Image (cartoon, helix red, strand yellow):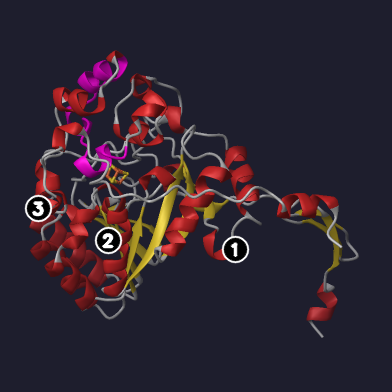
C-alpha cells in the first residue's frame, strides 16, 4: 500500500511539455521575408547576428534600462545574439523572459561586490600555455577561439570571450604540443569561446593532431551552438570531420525549455549520426531555471534528443553575473524535486566549481538522516518518507 505522501507524489498533475516549434516559425518581423533556406544557413545566421544597440532595440523592443546597459557593456563583451536565439524571446514575458535575460545586457552586470572575480576558475593561474589550462592531472583544456555565436550574459569566461586579439595557429600549435608531450593527459576539452565558430579546416587540423596522440582517450568539444545557432551543424562537411574523429563527446548548454527548438533537435540527431556522444551542462540561474518544474521538461526533451543531462552548475562567482547567482540550497531543492520525477538518466550532477581552480565538488541533497555505530541507518527517499536500512558492518567486509 502506498503511504499518503507516495500517493500524493504519484498523483501529481501530468507534466505539460511545451510544443517544440522551429525558430523559423517564430522569427521576428524584421526577418519576415527571409526564406527557410536562408534561415537554415549558418553563414546567414552568423552575418545577421544582432550586434548593434539599434538592431537589438528593433528586434527585441529594448527597455530604456536595457538600452543603457547595452551602451555601457565593455566592447569585447557587448551583446551578440543570433537571429535563431532572438526568435526564442517571448515578448509576452517582458524583461523577465528567461531567454531574453541570457542574451540582453542588464544594468545589474555593473554591480560590484566583494568576492566576485574576473577569472573565477583560476584558468589563467593554471595556464600551461597562452591558450591552455590544466586543473586536474589527467585533463587539459584548450581555448581554441575567443568567439561565440552569442555572448551569454551569465558567462564565466566573459573576461576573454569576444576579445579582438585572435588566438593564432602558432598559439594553438603550442597548446597542442604541450598536451601531446604530457603523457599524463588522457582527456582534452576543446573550448573557448565556442570552438564551433572555428572554420572547418582549423577544427579538422586540431582534431587530427589530438586523435593521433595515443595517450589521449577522450576528446570533448564544448559548444553552446546547438542551443544558440544549431544551423552550424547542418553542414555536411563539418559532420564528416566530426565522424572521422569519432567518438567525440560534445557538451552543450541548454538552460530553459524555451530553448528547445526543431532546429536544435535536428542538429542533435545529425551529431549523433556522426558518432558524437551528447551531454548537457546547464547553469543554475536565478529566476530562470532555479525550479525543478522548469528543468524537468527541458531534461525530458534533451533525453528524447539523445542528449544526457550531465552537469547542473552552480553559477560561478564571475564579475557581472551576481544577479544570476542562487544560494546552494536552491539547487539542492531542485535536485530533490528532480529525483522521483525523472529516472537517473535525466538527473545531472549538481556541482560547484570551486573558485581559483580548486576543482568541482558534488552537491547532493542529504539522503542519510541518521547513521548509528551499529550500522543502523535511516534514509529519506524521493517523496520524503524515512526508511530504515542496516549497513554491512565494516568487520564483515574484511572476512
Ligand atoms: S557560448 Fe559559452 S563561452 Fe560563449 S558566451 Fe556563452 S557561455 Fe560564454
Q: Nearer the viewer, residue 385 or 213?
A: 385
Instruction: Give the labeled residue for mark 2.
Output: 267
Q: Nearer the viewer, residue 268 or 391?
A: 268
The Cα–Cα distance between marks 1 and 2, rounded to whole angstroms, is: 25 Å
Task: Mark 3 and mark 1 in contact? Answer it, CB < 8 Å.
Answer: no
The residue stretch that appears in magenta: 65-88
Q: For the view shown, which residue lies furthest in the bottom direction?
A: 399
Instruction: Give the labeled residue for mark 3.
Output: 168
The answer to whether one can see residue 374 in this image is yes
Disc 1 packing (10 Å; few <14; some 14–19; many ≥20): few
- Secondary structure under tag 1 reads loop
Task: Mark 1 and mark 2 in contact? Answer it, CB < 8 Å.
Answer: no
Instruction: Give the labeled residue for mark 1.
Output: 343
The answer to whether residue 232 is magenta is: no
Residue at position x 8%, y 65% in the image: 201
For marks 2 and 3, the one nearer the N-term is 3
Q: Quadrant of ligand 1?
A: top left
Amino acid at each position: 500500500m502506498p503511504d499518503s505522501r507516495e500517493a500524493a507524489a504519484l498523483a501529481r498533475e501530468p507534466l505539460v511539455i511545451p510544443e517544440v516549434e522551429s525558430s523559423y516559425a517564430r522569427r521576428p518581423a524584421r526577418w519576415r521575408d527571409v526564406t527557410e533556406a536562408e534561415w537554415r544557413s549558418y553563414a546567414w545566421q552568423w552575418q545577421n547576428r544582432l550586434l548593434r544597440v539599434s538592431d537589438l532595440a528593433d528586434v527585441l523592443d529594448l527597455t530604456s534600462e536595457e538600452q543603457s546597459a547595452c551602451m555601457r557593456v565593455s566592447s569585447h563583451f557587448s551583446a551578440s545574439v543570433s537571429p535563431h536565439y532572438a526568435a526564442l524571446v517571448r515578448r509576452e514575458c517582458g524583461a523577465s523572459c528567461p531567454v531574453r535575460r541570457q542574451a540582453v545586457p542588464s544594468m545589474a552586470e555593473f554591480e560590484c561586490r566583494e568576492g566576485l572575480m574576473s577569472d573565477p576558475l583560476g584558468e589563467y593561474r593554471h595556464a600551461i600555455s597562452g591558450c591552455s589550462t590544466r586543473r586536474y592531472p589527467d585533463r587539459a583544456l584548450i581555448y581554441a577561439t575567443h568567439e561565440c555565436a552569442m555572448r551569454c550574459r551569465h558567462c564565466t569566461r566573459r573576461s576573454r570571450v569576444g576579445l579582438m586579439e585572435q588566438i593564432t595557429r602558432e598559439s594553438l600549435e603550442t597548446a597542442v604540443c604541450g598536451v601531446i608531450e604530457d603523457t599524463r593527459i588522457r582527456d582534452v576539452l576543446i573550448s573557448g569561446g565556442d570552438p564551433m565558430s572555428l572554420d572547418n579546416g582549423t577544427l579538422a587540423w586540431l582534431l587530427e593532431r589530438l586523435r593521433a596522440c595515443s595517450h589521449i582517450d577522450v576528446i570533448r568539444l564544448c559548444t553552446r551552438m546547438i542551443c544558440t545557432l544549431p544551423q552550424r551543424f547542418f553542414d555536411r562537411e563539418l559532420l564528416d570531420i566530426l565522424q572521422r574523429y569519432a567518438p567525440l563527446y560534445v557538451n552543450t548548454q541548454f538552460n530553459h525549455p524555451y530553448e528547445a527548438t526543431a532546429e536544435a533537435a535536428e542538429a542533435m540527431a545529425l551529431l549523433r549520426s556522426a558518432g558524437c556522444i551528447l551531454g548537457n551542462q546547464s547553469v543554475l540561474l536565478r529566476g530562470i531555471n532555479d525550479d525543478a518544474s522548469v528543468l524537468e521538461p527541458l531534461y525530458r526533451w534533451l533525453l528524447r534528443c539523445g542528449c544526457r543531462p550531465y552537469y547542473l552548475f552552480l553559477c560561478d562567482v564571475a564579475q557581472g553575473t551576481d544577479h544570476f547567482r542562487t544560494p546552494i540550497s536552491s539547487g539542492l531543492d531542485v535536485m530533490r524535486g528532480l529525483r522521483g520525477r525523472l529516472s537517473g538518466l535525466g538527473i545531472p550532477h549538481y556541482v560547484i566549481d570551486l573558485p581559483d581552480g580548486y576543482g568541482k565538488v558534488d552537491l547532493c541533497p542529504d539522503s542519510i538522516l541518521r547513521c548509528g555505530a551499529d550500522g543502523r541507518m535511516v534514509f529519506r527517499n524521493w517523496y520524503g518518507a524515512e526508511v530504515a536500512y542496516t549497513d554491512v558492518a565494516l568487520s564483515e567486509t574484511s572476512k
